[in-house]
Image: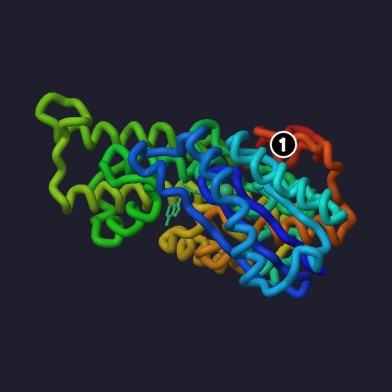
Amino acid sequence: MIVLGIESSCDDTGAAVVTDSKEILGDALQSQEEHKQYGGVVPEIAARAHLEHVDEIISVCMQRARIDLKDVDAIAASAGPGLIGGVVVGVMTAKALALALNKPFVAVNHLEAHALCARIASDVRFPYLLLLVSGGHCQILVVKDVGEYERLGTTIDDAAGEAFDKVAKMLNLGYPGGPMIEKLAATGDDSRFTLPRPLIGSGDCNLSFSGLKTAVRKIIESYSPDGSIEHAILPKQDVADVCACFQMTATDCLVRKLEKAIKYFKENYPDGQDLVVSGGVAANTYLRSALKNLAARYDLDFAAPPIRFCTDNGVMVAWAGLERFRKGFTSPLDFKPRPRWPLDENAPKAPGAGGVKA
Ligand code: KG4
Ligand code: ZN
């Protein structure tokens, strides 16, 4: 079984061809540089760039795969959630190919693509506990099966990646902020500043990063002669110290909420054996090693996609498309792209659903 997947929901145009024996036959990715100067993704610029590059990315992917489009069994695309202009580009392209080649179309939830991605590279079994941390989302879920999720917690304000990006912007480190913060944090002192851990005592698995970000802002402003963040001048070492403190605190918040989730998971899913992290922030090696230790403490196996498949890419979409297709899930050609698309929307509502009480 061979599936082509297309990703275009944010600022990466990706295509990949994967097989049910977990081979990546071909893969091509173009990360848009156009947004760097704005410190965040500009939706209209992103949509235009996807439109410009998607055909070429697919043909490079097919050349690398050394197969013909007619050898593909299904065509998948990220159909939401995401920036609608970009999503439409990928979905329309996939539908056009499906129609022309007379192959099934598979609409993939972008979050499901992140959620299932670890399964292409490692032997992760259902059910597993997942921390999904990206630029737009921050959720703790039980992945029961393809298309079956129980959400245990979510951020009530910023996503984890968004917090990394906003802190990086305040420190003039460019976009995306995560990789730069990780790099500088490695030379910083994580005990230099004490930062708050919002919602830590809330008793549920929800997260909040807004107060943490504001606390970082106040530290940066204290370096400004007039108290404004624009005029703040931080010595290099202090920038590294802020990065280290922020990364350590954000990680600690995630670890502590996951600890609650693990207890619930073990009680309610006794067959579950794996803790998985995915999404762009899962590329962070400091977070990965903290989660590896956490998993070991609770006798769980830890898995994460290879670093290059944590941020958006075509492989995860092709793989999720394949997992759906082999279960018999395909989508009609009039499927409407969805800017909002919760993973657990079809889940039966358990009493007290919406957050696990400790
Ligand atoms: O999954 P992704 O590519 O896009 C979304 O679906 O949102 O995630 C992008 C996010 C950005 O916020 C970026 O700063 C963050 O992932 N990120 C990182 C790292 N690499 C990417 N955050 C922390 N550490 C990293 N090494
Ligand atoms: Zn993503």
Q: Which image quadrant: the N terminus?
A: bottom right
The residue lying toward the viewer, choosing from 33 and 188, is 33
Which residue is the extreme one toward the right? 328
Report the number of discs.
1
Q: Quadrant of residue 332?
A: top right
Three-letter residue code for mark 1 = Pro
Q: Is residue 270 visible?
A: no
Q: Which image quadrant: the C terminus?
A: top right
The residue lying toward the viewer, choosing from 1 and 254, is 1
Q: Residue at x 81, y 55 (%)?
A: 324
Residue tagged 1: 337
Which residue is the extreme one toward the left? 225
Location of residue 144 with respect to 91 vertically, above or below: below
The residue lying toward the viewer, choosing from 295 and 34, is 34
Q: Secondary structure at mark 1?
A: loop
Q: Quadrant of residue 109?
A: top right
Badge 1 density bin: few <14, some 14–19, many ≥20, Cα 10 Å: many
The x, y position of residue 274, in whole percent, is 66, 64
Relative to 65, is 278 on the left or the right? left
Relative to 227, is 116 on the left or the right? right
The x, y position of residue 121, in whole percent, is 64, 71
Q: Residue at x 66, y 47 (%)?
A: 110
Location of residue 326 with respect to 350 vertically, above or below: below
